[in-house]
Image (tube, rainbow, N blue to C red):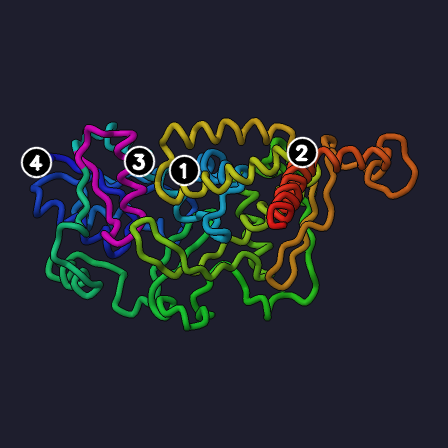
Amino acid sequence: MPKKICLAYSGGLDTSAIVPWLREHYRCEVVCCVGDVGQGADELTGVEEKARMSGASACRIIDLRKEFVEDYVYPTILSGAIYEGRYLLGTSIARPILAKAQVEAARQTGCDALAHGCTGKGNDQVRFESAYAALAPDLPVIAPWREWTLSSREDLLNYLAERKIPTSASLTKIYSRDRNLWHISHEGGGIEDPWNEPPEDAWMLTASPADSPAQHEDVHLEFARGRATALNGRACDPVAMLTELNAIAGRHGVGRVDLVENRLVGMKSRGLYETPGGTVLVEALRGLEELILDRETRHYRDQIGLKFAELVYNGQWFTPLREALWSCVRTIAESLDGEVVVRLHKGRAVTVKRRSPNSLYSEKFATFGKEDVYNQKHAEGFIRLFSLPSRIAAINHLARGTAARKGAR
């Protein structure tokens, strides 16, 4: 039996109930770990007091925002990781850094077990526990949602009320949300029926495109090695950059996604995702890559992006393959220097200008006018060699047909 458990804590209804449940069922001390990945003051204000009032002996709040953007979010941007073509992995990518911070807090406070509040139906249980396995295989893991008999929001509220533990949660909460600097997700309520239109009251970071400004707005981004370093001529650190882009793009309705996705655990789920600033960064970097990366490198990077997205979504961040792919992506990104202007208008973010000292694009080479580098007569030989396998196959096919006709006579 564990004597001291480190719980990944949010201050929400689930983890507020988990603290007393762990104490009662395991007769142990509970230390709460809160990772600040940019979920905002609404979630963090008073969270330490909530944890203690629930029965925790201590609560650690760890500022992970800078590390989160630099070491977790940017690898997904640079690799082109987009799950099932649309999801920018906002929830998924926060899990490995939260789990890592929790393991470090557990070691520092002498905990001999880890716990989380993920449900038995979701992906997050896999993400957290896969990270635990890679970072702390010696620590047992407790997942209350797979053990206790509580099965509803009402059960949790009654459980807390019986123990006179205060909570701000209520039965009127409609949506389940997860927020960080990169995005916010919305699930539950009317969202669960895929025949329902996305309810307008669910969105929080973005204006309705229909009600967004009639006039477009351009944002000017400067990049060094694929990372945005300046916004509209002003140097910004990664956290400030993303915070400001979220506000700018959000008022133009940019970054909304309504997706029915395939969960790792086998079922489909519907979620609404808002990633306004991230959508702008992804669009800008794609525009820069079009100038700089040669065809084979760009196409291979696209392949890496598909696998990278799966690894992140499936909770396989702390694996040799993910690290190897990141090494490749980091090398590819070394030449991604330049400037991009992205136009925001009515829910869309579109690159309208781009330039780079490393550009492979040359108007001189691409023009239909006379130039010295490309002789159009040389294309004939290239085409004959490029199409040679098809030509040989066709010749053989024709020869077999001729032989068959002669044999039929």
Mark 4 belongs to which amino acid?
Met
For marks 1 and 3, the one nearer the N-term is 1
Residue 230 in view (yes/no): no
Element type at marker 3? helix
For marks 4 and 1, the one nearer the N-term is 4
Q: Is residue 255 magenta?
A: no
The residue beneath circle 2 is 294
Mark 2 belongs to which amino acid?
Asp
Name the residue rendered at 46%, 62% in the picture. 258
Name the image quarter holding the N terminus: top left
For marks 1 and 2, the one nearer the N-term is 1
The residue beneath circle 3 is 131
**In the rendered view, would you say 59 is above or below 88?**
above
Viewer-nearest of discs 1 and 3 = 3
- Do the numbered discs 4 and 1 sit on residues whose CB atoms are within 8 Å? no
Name the residue rendered at 41%, 72% in the picture. 195
Q: Of all residues shown, which one is farthest toward the front?
A: 409
Label 3: how many Cα within 10 Å (few below 14, some 14–19, many 20+):
many
The residue beneath circle 1 is 64
Q: Is residue 241 left or right of residue 149?
A: right
Number of numbered callouts drawn: 4
Viewer-nearest of discs 1 and 2 = 2
Give the residues drawn in magenta, as a range: 113-140
* C-alpha distance separating marks 2 and 3: 35 Å
- The label number, if any, that marks residue 1 in the structure image: 4
